[in-house]
Image: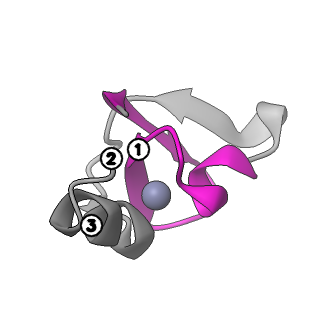
Amino acid sequence: MKKSPWHSIKTYVYHVCTNCNAGNNIEKENLRPGKGGKRLCRECKNWIAKKRC
Ligand SMILES: [Zn+2]
């Protein structure tokens, strides 16, 4: 499922898929809302391509 973007201040990507492992493994203290001017996460991109996001 897609939701509004979030990202980690420790990485260079943002996430939009609730089933993204990398997106779900972000520690609470590093979690920020929005795209943060970053690129879309590769795993999220794959989920979207498979229409599983
Ligand atoms: Zn992701």
Q: Amino acid at mark 1?
A: Cys
- Provide the secondary structure element on which disc 2 rests: loop
Which quarter of the image is occupied by the N terminus? top left
**Residue wearing tag 2:** 53
Whether the residues at callouts 2 and 1 have beta carbons within 8 Å, the answer is yes
**Residue wearing tag 1:** 17
Q: Earlier in the sequence, mark 3 or mark 1?
A: 1
Give residue 29's quadrant in the image. Answer: top right
Residue 7 x, y percent position in the rendering: 50, 44
Q: Amino acid at mark 3?
A: Lys
Residue 7 magenta-drawn? yes
Name which residue lies at 33% across and 62% down: 47
Residue 43 magenta-drawn? no
- The answer for how far apart the CA atoms under marks 2 and 1 are is 5 Å
- The answer for how far apart the CA atoms under marks 2 and 3 are is 9 Å
**Residue wearing tag 3:** 45
Name which residue lies at 26% across and 49% down: 37
Callout 1: CB less than 8 Å from ligand 1 = yes
The answer to whether 26 is drawn above or below residue 40 in the figure is: above
The answer to whether 43 is drawn above or below residue 6 in the figure is: below
Q: How is the image coloured?
A: one colour
Can I make out residue 40 in this image? no
| Residue 20 placement, left or right of 50 | right
Question: Which portion, as a residue range, is magenta?
Answer: 2-25
